[in-house]
Amino acid sequence: MYAAFVHSHLNFISHYFFSGTKSEQKTLKKIQKRALRAVENVSTFSHTAQIFKKLNILPIEKLAEYNIFKFMYRLNGYSEMKSIFPYWQNKTAQFHLRNSHHYEIPKIKPYLMSKNLPISIYPRIFNRYIDIFTPNIGYGDQWAKLKEHLIDEYLESNKCTSAKTCFVCKKAQILSPDNAKNEKLQRIKELITKKGTRKRLKYNNLRTRYIKHVKQ
């Protein structure tokens, strides 16, 4: 169900994910997390990092990096494709350096660089993961290893470190049935105490007035 109705659409637009606005990216992340929570049948405010790991599903931002890297890797391997994209070229130097297989980042205006357009974000993603990907070649499915690395990378940066300071954990605790029941009992106790105090004050006032009346 997830693969048919959610993943297919996210995979289709993943190449242009980073070119979208922050609000558009946030909406896509919410949709994906909501779908995963529905698949796992967990509460609305449950953490999703472990669910991504359990189901071996890439978060949308990591899915975008995965597909972009795959595109750039194939581009790097086929000289015919390089002629179609002349603005992405390997670094040139007099000597063979360890990062000579990296791509040059095209020089564009600073305000365009901040928009994460394909012309700048694609080579940056390729340079980020090529040194991790290359040693895996010849040892099983290197693409599966890269996917596992991306999921672990996401899990490491999004795991819950403390239930006391975590917003999601606090929200889930507030909305839990046991906590709601305890809060209701506490409100009832406070209401009984408040009404009892009022009745006690009313009784004391009546007693004081009666004593004054008797003395007169």
Image (tube, helix red, strand yellow):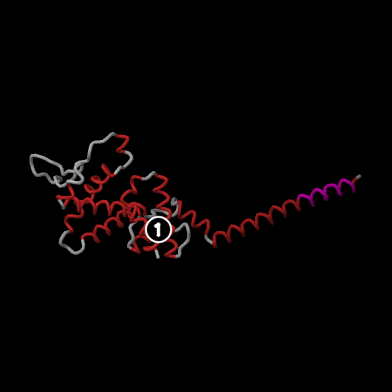
User: x, y (%) of residue 122?
Assistant: 26, 46
Q: Quadrant of residue 105?
A: top left
User: x, y (%) of residue 119?
Assistant: 26, 42
Q: Residue furthest right?
A: 216
User: x, y (%) of residue 143?
Assistant: 23, 59
Q: Quadrant of the C terminus?
A: top right
Is residue 182 shown left or right of residue 198?
left
Is residue 62 shown left or right of residue 35?
left
Q: Quadrant of residue 152?
A: bottom left
User: x, y (%) of residue 20?
Assistant: 37, 45
Span of residues in magenta: 201-213
Q: Residue at x 83, y 50 (%)?
A: 206
Name the kind of residue labelled 1 in the image. Answer: Thr
Q: Main secondary structure of the magenta part?
A: helix
Q: Quadrant of the N terminus?
A: bottom left
Q: Could you say which is closer to the camera, residue 104 or residue 207? A: 104
Q: Is residue 35 above or below residue 82?
A: below
Task: Please give the residue where the numbered disc 1 appears in the rendered image.
Answer: 48
